[in-house]
Image: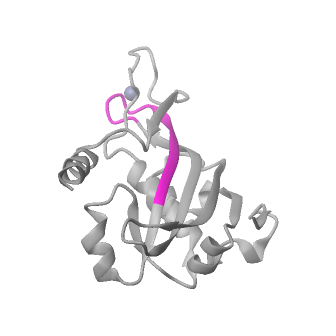
Amino acid sequence: MAQFSYTARMENQLNAPQIDVKAFAKAQTHLSGQTPLAQFERISQDCVGEVTGDVVWSIQGSMKTSASGADAAWLHLDATAHVPLTCQRCLGAVSLALRLDQDFRFVADEATALAQDDESQEDVLVLSRDFDVLALVEDELLMAMPIVPMHEACTSERAPTSRGEEVDVSAEKPNPFAALASLKISKS
Ligand SMILES: [Zn+2]
């Protein structure tokens, strides 16, 4: 198993690692990094105050044989981040702890991906020779962020500017779409 890791902060040329997904999967490569949250521009736009801390992430490639007998490239993504947002109930700061733990299966083209994504538990993406790993991490973190961030319990004594408490938002929390997906799968 090929394995290497790096710290994006130190290796500037690897700030935006791009991978050949099929080769990465065939070699069962593991890639991990620690990237400043401030480097993720789309997430930073939603943040309040100073954007500090790192997104810690790793991806693992593998080849898996589907029920139809065809080999497919898979990536597993793990990531954690703490995102400073504003609680929409008390307007205080809330630091959301985001965790990603997701599987991606790669197919040849966009049409296949669209056709299979809804009925698959894993996310289905299109194979690429220069797949942008950090763009995937950012996409998934954005999707894991709640539309209306809130403390689990706001305390009335908290001044609007006080430090936020930690609130866990797990990407694995069941959502209505996941429920639909499992309904569809039970048919086959
Ligand atoms: Zn609150």
- Quarter of the image holding residue 171? top left
Asked if residue 100 is positioned above or below residue 10 in the image, the reply reads above
Percent position (x, y) of residue 143? 39, 54
Name the residue rendered at 38%, 20% in the picture.
Answer: 153
120, 136: nearer the viewer: 120
Percent position (x, y) of residue 27? 69, 72
Percent position (x, y) of residue 135? 52, 69
- Quarter of the image holding residue 62? bottom right
Instruction: Quadrant for the C terminus, please.
Output: bottom left
Instruction: State how the image is colored.
Output: one colour
Name the residue rendered at 28%, 43% in the picture.
Answer: 175
Can residue 3 be found in the magenta stretch?
no
Residue 175 is at least partly visible in this image: yes
Asked if residue 145 is positioned above or below residue 167 in the image, the reply reads below
Residue furthest to the top in view is 157
Residue 45 is at least partly visible in this image: no
Percent position (x, y) of residue 162? 53, 27
Highlighted range, magenta: 87-103
Asked if residue 97 is positioned above or below residue 157 in the image, the reply reads below
Residue furthest to the right in view is 10
1, 55: nearer the viewer: 1
Name the residue rendered at 82%, 65% in the picture.
Answer: 10
Can residue 95 be found in the magenta stretch?
yes
148, 135: nearer the viewer: 135
Name the residue rendered at 51%, 82% in the picture.
Answer: 128
Q: Chief secondary structure of the magenta span?
A: strand
**Quarter of the image where ligand 1 sits:** top left
Instruction: Quadrant for the N terminus, please.
Output: bottom right
Number of marks drawn: 0
